[in-house]
Image: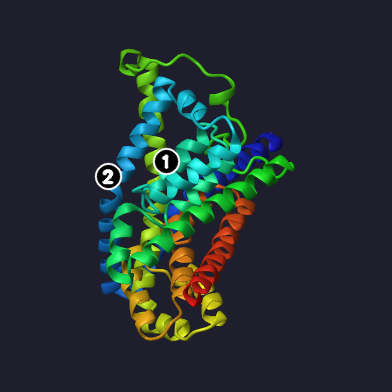
Amino acid sequence: MPELVLASRNRLAGAGRQVVQHEQAWLATALILAGLLVVAPDQATESAAFTLGSLLDVTPFLVLSIGLAAYAGATGADALIARAFTGSPLVMIALAAAAGGLSPFCSCGVIPLIAALLSMGVPLSAVMAFWLASPIMDPSMFVLTSGVLGIEFAIAKTLAAIGLGLAGGFAVHAMVGAGGLRDPLRPGIGNGGCGGSAVRAPGPVVWRFWSERERLRKFAREGLKATLFLAKWLTLAFLLESLMLRYVPADLVTSVLGGEGLAPISLATLVGVPAYLNGYAALPLVGGLVDQGMAPGAGLAFLVAGGVTSLPAAIAVWALVKKPLFLLYVGFALGGSFAAGLLYQGWQVL
């Protein structure tokens, strides 16, 4: 009898730990808001409004991506999508980097697509190439960057996005080929990487999935699962971003990144990771810094590093992959941003 009681307690404790682990994002969000209500009630209201507004802004991207992922899973079309990413790995990486650098996805909107690709068994190298390139540049960002910083800077940023995607994709391809990065995803995300079940064992595709009850249920399950997963992590990400906008003054960033030479590029790369606000807010900041004498290469390094590792993107990456791959992702962002800044600064000198 004591053994049964002890076993029951252990099971309950294990279940409790699993609940806390799976709901840690909601718990963190609730604790932050509760703390703000105590120490800064006005900021709690502003942060809640900012978070809700940001979620509404990315809703079209999320609905489209989640719907496509759920549809692909319910119809069996995920096998076809995954097969589109098969073939020559080098060609696949190049296409993914180019598509990422030109796609209209923001750092938040690309997350559900990345999650879907990983769960479909798309090779990790191609996903990483797309993942790194996509948050840096998109058509609307290109136009705005051209207006604020000039067409040359916009082209340089686009090339940096594609170059970073290529470098990350090829590096991951080499690591996987050497036996590294096995099982990189967190439990429950999928079994992507160098070949998933969608590629290994494709089933029949039923485009009108609603005619079969089980497929209709799968559509609902997949959609709900993706929605809950993204909602909790993006809510936390936008809440943290609101606090950064409030408590990290732009003047502080300006004082750190001002000046010329090699040091500002290094500092811009490092500061860009935690201090980046968002793509549109960062452009006038960098424009002002350049007008004050900051090296253009440092401005490019700041925009590239911050774009890849902005709060929503970084938190979503952390939620999708295990720690080693997350650190590799941040390393690519830092190294690639520094290299892009140096190359652009060298081009300016020439």
Q: Nearer the viewer, residue 316 or 294?
A: 294
Give left or right: position of 13 versus 73.
Answer: right
The span from disc 1 to disc 2 (Cα, nearest Å) is 13 Å
Count of number-bearing discs = 2
Element under disc 2: helix
Name the image quarter holding the N terminus: top right
* Percent of width and height locating residue 217: 37, 22
Element under disc 1: helix
Asked if 33 appears above or below 285 in the picture, the reply is above
Residue at numbered disc 2: 60
Q: Residue at x 39, y 19 (%)?
A: 215
Say whether residue 220 is visible: yes
Asked if 337 appears above or below 183 in the picture, the reply is below
* Percent of width and height locating residue 266: 56, 76
* Disc with the residue nearer the chain's start (1 vs 2): 2
Circle 2 residues within 10 Å: few <14, some 14–19, many ≥20: few
Circle 1 residues within 10 Å: few <14, some 14–19, many ≥20: many
* Percent of width and height locating residue 295: 46, 79
Q: Residue at x 59, y 22 (%)?
A: 200
* Percent of width and height locating residue 26: 42, 53
Q: Type of residue at label 1?
A: Leu
Quadrant in the rendering for residue 28: bottom left
Say whether residue 39 is visible: no
Residue at numbered disc 1: 113
Q: Residue at x 42, y 55 (%)?
A: 135
Q: Residue at x 47, y 74 (%)?
A: 348
- Farthest residue, direction right: 178
